[in-house]
Amino acid sequence: MPTSVQQQNRQRFDDIAAGWDESPRRRELAAGVAAAIAETLPLQAHWHALEYGCGTGLVGAALAPRLGRLLACDVSPGMLSVLAGKARAAGLDRLQTRVLDLTSEPPPAERFDLIFSSMTMHHIPDVAALLRTFHGMLAPGGWLALVDLDSEDGSFHGEGTPGVMHHGFDRNALQGALRAAGFAATGARTAHTVSKTAADGRVRHYPVFLITARA
Ligand SMILES: C[S@@+](CC[C@H](N)C(=O)[O-])C[C@H]1O[C@@H](n2cnc3c(N)ncnc32)[C@H](O)[C@@H]1O
């Protein structure tokens, strides 16, 4: 039986979880993303938020002190276990972790004031379906913040990386998909630019967008 995209992602990220935070490039990206979200959205200390595809929580742990409660979700138990250890050590007791794959499981019953997701949408086969799911999970007027690569030529991950479903996104097309899913008032900005040596040895620059929308 072929391996599903979710199984590929779970396996790949479980395998690399322990060393994920060692990369300065990933830490810089996450710091840029957390700063961009905090600058763009009116974060409130009473908000109930969900991070989707939180990984080891490089973004979520930075934003958690600005929020009420944060439910940090990921398909990879290995990534979540790294985050849970860091949250315990930092005393982030309002941050909870949960294994969740919204492409194959129902959403949690509670409603959220904010859903944010960084560098995860490119792993999702049916983005339009997930946007509809996010819309249904938000309280009226709740915020969605999506961060991912602008359209690229596939060199960011390199050929053969399992579980990569999109070579970035066109901002206008994604904003159109958000409107089709029921969101309003979408805005877009560049959150960060990743500089990375591609498989061919050349250093390339990959802009990363932050798109925000309201339910
Ligand atoms: C590139 S990493 C980004 C992690 C983190 N957001 C960060 O910025 O460091 C992508 C994350 O998405 C998660 N992921 C992939 N597919 C997923 C799915 N269907 N549901 C939930 N998480 C998923 C992976 O396990 C991984 O932790």
Image (cartoon, rainbow, N blue to C red):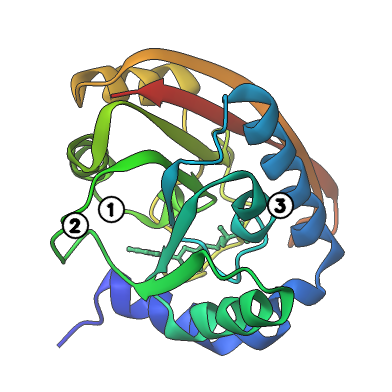
Q: Hey, what amino acid is under mark 2?
A: Pro
Q: Residue at x 50, y 86 (%)?
A: 78
Q: Residue 137 is drawn in which quadrant?
A: top left
Q: Relative to residue 60, is residue 46 depicted above or below? A: above
Q: Residue at x 43, y 78 (%)?
A: 76
Q: Nearer the viewer, residue 170 or 118?
A: 118
Q: Residue at x 68, y 78 (%)?
A: 86
Q: Nearer the viewer, mark 2 or mark 1?
A: 2
Helix, strand or loop for disc 3: helix
Does the beta carbon of the residue at mark 1 sit less than 8 Å from ligand 1?
Answer: no
Locate residue 146, reporting x and y percent. 48, 37
Number of residues whose C-alpha sits closer than 10 Å to that of mark 3, classed few (under 14), some (14–19) or many (20 or more): many
Does the beta carbon of the residue at mark 3 sit less than 8 Å from ligand 1?
Answer: yes
Q: Relative to residue 152, is residue 93 depicted above or below? A: below
**Are circles 3 and 1 on residues that touch, CB within 8 Å?**
no
Determine whether, in the image, residue 33 is placed left or right of residue 148: right
The residue beneath circle 3 is: 30
Does the beta carbon of the residue at mark 2 sit less than 8 Å from ligand 1?
Answer: no
Mark 3 or mark 1: name the one nearer the start of the chain.
3
In what quadrant of the picture does the N terminus appear? bottom left
